[in-house]
Amino acid sequence: MRRKIVVGNWKMNNTITESAALATAIVGELGAGFSGCEVGIAPTFIALQEAGSIIEGSAVQLVAQNCHYENDGAFTGEVSARMVKAAGCSYVIIGHSERRQFFGETNATVNLRVKKALSEGLKVILCVGETLGERESGIMASVVTTQVREGLAGVSDITEIVVAYEPVWAIGTGKTASSAQAEEVHLLIRTTIAELYGQKAASHLRIQYGGSVKPSNAVELFAMPNIDGGLIGGAALNAADFVAIIRAAS
Ligand code: PGA
């Protein structure tokens, strides 16, 4: 039985003070002793330490939104895997579609980041997903399976990997993939992983769905056999909504 995992991706939202308030509200809403599923929050880099100190001792884990593949050096504006690990993160999100779309991430750079993060002892949430144009032109399956294969190239052990399927057309648009549409792609991802790593590894892999998950659609999505939780954007910025989604996974 796979343990579900729900992570709030705060993206470029909230100052340090606002992040602290949101983290406090989430821990409060969740209550002490929560153990229904794995939970994480991904504030901006500058708020990691403050949010981390607030969630310490709770069921909520600290997650980074990205990391670079070099340890240090002349990479203005970047933060390394080693740094986010030292800041207390247990997971890092890699290859989010906004990174691919706006910041030039490719499957090759995603792969470098995945390998570096793993080597620093971070767990990885590897994001994949097709655009609307790719879906409409019938290449969704090849786009997603290529992202999986190339993102994981050279990774021999996927124990510390979570895959997040996030159709780009459903992110922040209010358009959720139907549970059947999402399940179809989750199954495709699991089948691809089985080809690469064998049936056992594939059956243990958690695959989150992301894209306009809300309290009102979370139960149905999380009930699908291959959907193992969610990567939540907009709804993760409201403590009550985020915790409602967590409870839907629990
Ligand atoms: P959304 O974002 O929930 O706002 O659609 C999801 C994500 O990008 O991780």
Image (cartoon, rainbow, N blue to C red):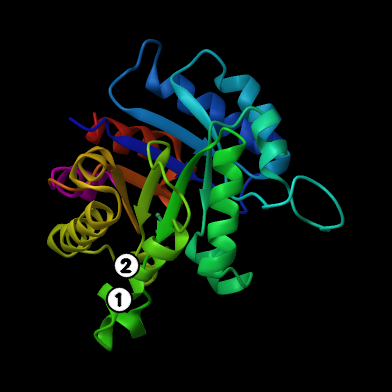
Q: CA distance from mark 1 to mark 2?
A: 5 Å
- Say few, some or many: other residues with alpha carbon within 10 Å of mark 2 (under 14 / 14 to 19 / 20 or more): many
Element under disc 1: helix
Q: Single out the residue that lies furthest toward the right.
A: 74
Identified at 70% across, 34% down, the residue is: 17
User: In the displayed structure, would residue 53 be above or below residue 32?
Assistant: below
Range drawn in magenta: 214-224
Identified at 73% across, 48% down, the residue is: 79
User: In the displayed structure, would residue 50 be above or below residue 142?
Assistant: above
Indicate yes or no whether the magenta region holds residue 219. Answer: yes
* Quadrant position of the N terminus in the picture: top left
Magenta residues: mostly which secondary structure? Answer: helix
- Say few, some or many: other residues with alpha carbon within 10 Å of mark 1 (under 14 / 14 to 19 / 20 or more): few
User: In the displayed structure, would residue 30 be above or below residue 106?
Assistant: above
Front-lying residue, 143 or 64: 143
Front-lying residue, 116 or 207: 116
Q: Which residue is mark 2?
A: 145
Q: Position of residue 50 (x, y in %)?
A: 69, 28
User: In the displayed structure, would residue 249 be above or below residue 143?
Assistant: above
Front-lying residue, 231 or 137: 137
Identified at 53% across, 58% down, the residue is: 111
Q: Do labels 1 and 2 touch, CB within 8 Å?
A: yes
Q: Quadrant of residue 89?
A: top right
Q: Position of residue 129 (x, y in %)?
A: 37, 66
Q: Which residue is mark 1?
A: 142
User: Visible in this render: residue 143?
Assistant: yes
Q: Position of residue 22 (x, y in %)?
A: 55, 33
Q: Quadrant of residue 243?
A: top left
Q: Amino acid at mark 2?
A: Thr
